[in-house]
Amino acid sequence: MYLHNIFTRTHSLCKCHFVRKISAQITERKFDNRKYQYDLLVIGGGSGGLACAKETALLGRKVAVLDYVDPSARGTTWGLGGTCVNVGCIPKKLYHQAALLGKAIKDSKSYGWNFDESKIIHDWGTLKDAILGHVRSLNWGHRVQLKQKNVDYFNAKGSFITRNEVEILHKTGKKENFSAENIVIAVGGRPKYPDIPGALEYGITSDDVFSLEKPPGKTLVVGGSYVALECAGFLTGLGFDTTVMVRSICLRGFDQQMATLIANHMANDGTKFLHGCIPLKIEKAADLLTVKWESKDKQLHEDTFNTVLFAIGREAYTKNLGLEKIGVEFHPDSRKIVGQNEQTSVPNIYAIGDVLLGKPELTPVAIKAGRLLSHRLFGGSTQEMDYENVATTVFTPLEYGCVGLSEEEAIHRFGDNQIEVYHAFYKPLEFSLPQKDASQCYIKAIVSKTNKKIVGLHFLGPSAGEVIQGYSTALRCGFTLEHLQQTVGIHPTCAEEIVKLNITKASGLDPTVTGC
Ligand code: FAD
Ligand code: NDP
């Protein structure tokens, strides 16, 4: 058996080597008369760009990827990998985990752990250094992977000269031009600043918050969506006095019942909210920032903070790409690229990830779109990216995972009397001993009355991201209420409450789960 395994491995290694040699010969031959230096040039080495470049290299094509980070207004900069790795998902999730651990320490007392609570302190510097260390290891990992896969990587900024030529500006100031048959724009986005006095001078964004040298202290977070609520959630969890200033509603585009529950949970957890307010001005005196703002009733207010974090959305980073010159169509306000199946208005130029207009700004979306595009361009595939029913999770720090339609969107699409909502308030078993408030732990499934298909599933509670992931496959397979209700749960878990859903909103019955 052992020998057989060795033989099979050796044989397959040889076979692999042979195939690689042959394909290298074919590739070389293909490149002999090449008109362009590269089959594919990717501008932007983030989630989408790296995935597309690596996949294309695996298909035997000659690929280059350019990645360059312009420093933030505060001078923060980072390595290869884009937003997710450096200033997005990864550091965010680790800060979120730090906040959850802080809560777990407190909860542990009711589980018999005995310690002097006054001696527990959190050290921002230790956490920040550990997270940045991990991020640097990911930056390095990306560089190694590109090398192993024969992708030419340049830490340089790209801009179009013609539809097939890109100017490369190296860090040293050196310029050169590369030509490519196909070009993918994967430059992502950067956080926006409001146009008010002091914002750019004194404010920070998500580009800076994860690497602050000093703890942020008393913080004002401006914005009401993903980034704002997640940052406010972990800052509160780490013990900072945190206020969120919301202009209109929280989590626009999400199910608003869920959004309200999240805001309530955060408020119960200690995050302060200023609803219906907009900032007017920031001034600095000594080390303190004075923020002046206006409330809905036109009253003026002010308070002092150590840090003001703007999380008011992101704009596509396409300003200096030279899109106008080559005729790539983009939206005049957001500067996002208009495209159909990742194809821009110029036939050999494509766009993937956050830079693409009207698509979910999520890492797995950028990665999948990049890989599928590569296979369509170079692998003979016709498979298109499906942007519908993408699951997502907001880490606030009670997690909210969802897939499919919000209740509002389902009503809009099918009509009020064409959907049934099944729901439940439940108490995670783990909350029992510390007697934690579970009043926001809530689930709802939105069901089409016509075919009983589940069109939206929403889960607010511990580990929602882990819970909801599998349901995105189920939704894709068209699962129905019957499938859900026939599923046997895993006991004792929070996730089992989903398969136990049996009370409709319309019935008016109390949806609180009692007992097992
Ligand atoms: P990016 O990752 O932004 O990469 C673009 C790269 O191109 C960057 O490195 C940029 O510097 C570079 N570049 C720009 N212009 C040029 C140029 N001219 N030449 C060369 N290089 C250039 N998504 C999730 O799925 N889950 C999460 O939990 C999550 N959390 C997030 C938290 C925060 C705080 C933020 C801001 C985002 C979060 N996201 C999350 C979204 C996710 O990070 C993005 O959707 C994803 O990174 C988009 O990938 P991309 O390849 O389109 O662009
Ligand atoms: P969004 O565009 O989703 O939200 C912007 C927020 O800022 C809204 O609440 C908006 O309010 C508010 N706002 C806009 N302009 C102003 C202003 N001038 N003054 C005050 N408030 C203002 O941006 P985010 O940065 O939160 O998120 C960007 C994307 O990143 C998301 O769409 C998401 O896909 C991705 N992301 C994903 C995460 C995850 O998967 N967990 C986490 C974080 C980000 P209003 O509603 O009134 O317009």
Image: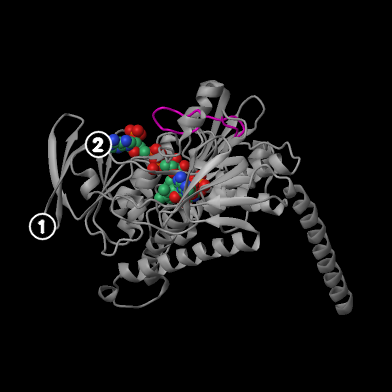
Instruction: Report the Cα–Cα distance between label 2 and label 1.
Output: 23 Å
In the rendered structure, the answer to whether residue 105 lies left or right of residue 382 reads left
Question: How many dots with numbers?
Answer: 2
Q: Nearer the viewer, residue 153 or 127?
A: 153
Main SS class of the magenta portion in the image: loop
Badge 2 is on which residue?
195
Q: Is the N terminus in the top left, top right, bottom left or bottom right quadrant? A: bottom right
Give the number of the disc on residue 286: 1
Identified by mark 2, the residue type is: Asp
The residue carrying mark 2 has its beta carbon less than 8 Å from ligand 2: yes
List x then y, in percent, for residue 93: 45, 57
Up the image or down, 3 lies above or below 172; here it is: below
Q: Quadrant of ligand 2?
A: top left
Figure quadrant of residue 173: bottom left
179 magenta-colored: no
Q: Which residues are magenta?
A: 329-344
Horizontal relation, residue 135 to residue 480: left or right: left
Quadrant in which residue 171 is drawn: bottom left
Q: Residue at x 84, y 68 (%)?
A: 14
Task: Categorize mark 2 by other alpha carbons within 10 Å: few (<14), some (14-19), many (20+).
Answer: few
Give whichever of discs 2 and 1 has the lower sequence position: 2
Q: Secondary structure at mark 2?
A: loop
Q: Is residue 1 above or below residue 356?
A: below
Query: In the rendered structure, which amino acid carries the disc numbered 1?
Result: Ala
